[in-house]
Image: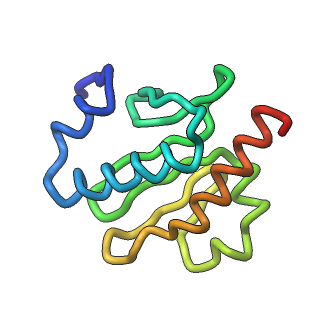
Amino acid sequence: MKKYATVSEYMADLPQMQKNVVKIMQELLADAAPEAEETISYNMPAIKQNGKVLVYFDAGKNQLGFYPTADPIVAFADQLKEFHTSKGAIQIPYDRPLPVKLIREIVAFRVEQVTGK
């Protein structure tokens, strides 16, 4: 498996449709957490703040994997009913629009957890 150093490198290897979704997610996360920095962690795009990863995401074959850690999965369980979830992951099928408002709320939740604000 290729190891990525930057999100740009990661995106360069994606098919166009997935690249488009990742670009939208990248912009959404930059807007939702303007003080966070983009990074690669576990070979996936991620954003971190105060040295801690807020969320990860990954372009799978049929869905975007969104990994906000376990706490938001529990905290937003009612809003996540229409998605397949596991302990720390949300699968967002490509044939559905990104749940922008929900992603923003989850990122805000994680920023609060990491910063105490």
**Residue drawn at x 64%, y 20% as measured from the top left:** 51
**Residue drawn at x 62%, y 38% as measured from the top left:** 54
Direction from residue 101 to residue 14 in the image, left or right: left
Direction from residue 28 to residue 113 in the image, left or right: right
Direction from residue 81 to residue 64 in the image, left or right: left
Looking at the image, which residue sits at the far right?
116
60 is higher (above) or lower (below) than 94: above
* Quadrant position of the C terminus in the picture: top right
Residue 114 spot, x, y in % from top left: 75, 33
**Residue drawn at x 67%, y 74% as measured from the top left:** 79
Colour basis: rainbow
Residue 41 spot, x, y in % from top left: 47, 27
Q: Quadrant of residue 4?
A: top left
**Residue drawn at x 60%, y 33% as measured from the top left:** 35
* Quadrant position of the N terminus in the picture: top left
Residue 116 spot, x, y in % from top left: 85, 35
Q: Nearer the viewer, residue 68 or 1?
A: 68
57 is higher (above) or lower (below) than 9: below
Q: Quadrant of residue 72?
A: bottom right
Residue 106 spot, x, y in % from top left: 66, 56
Q: Nearer the viewer, residue 87 or 49?
A: 49
Direction from residue 44 to residue 6 in the image, left or right: left
Q: Nearer the viewer, residue 1 or 36?
A: 36
| Count of numbered tags | 0
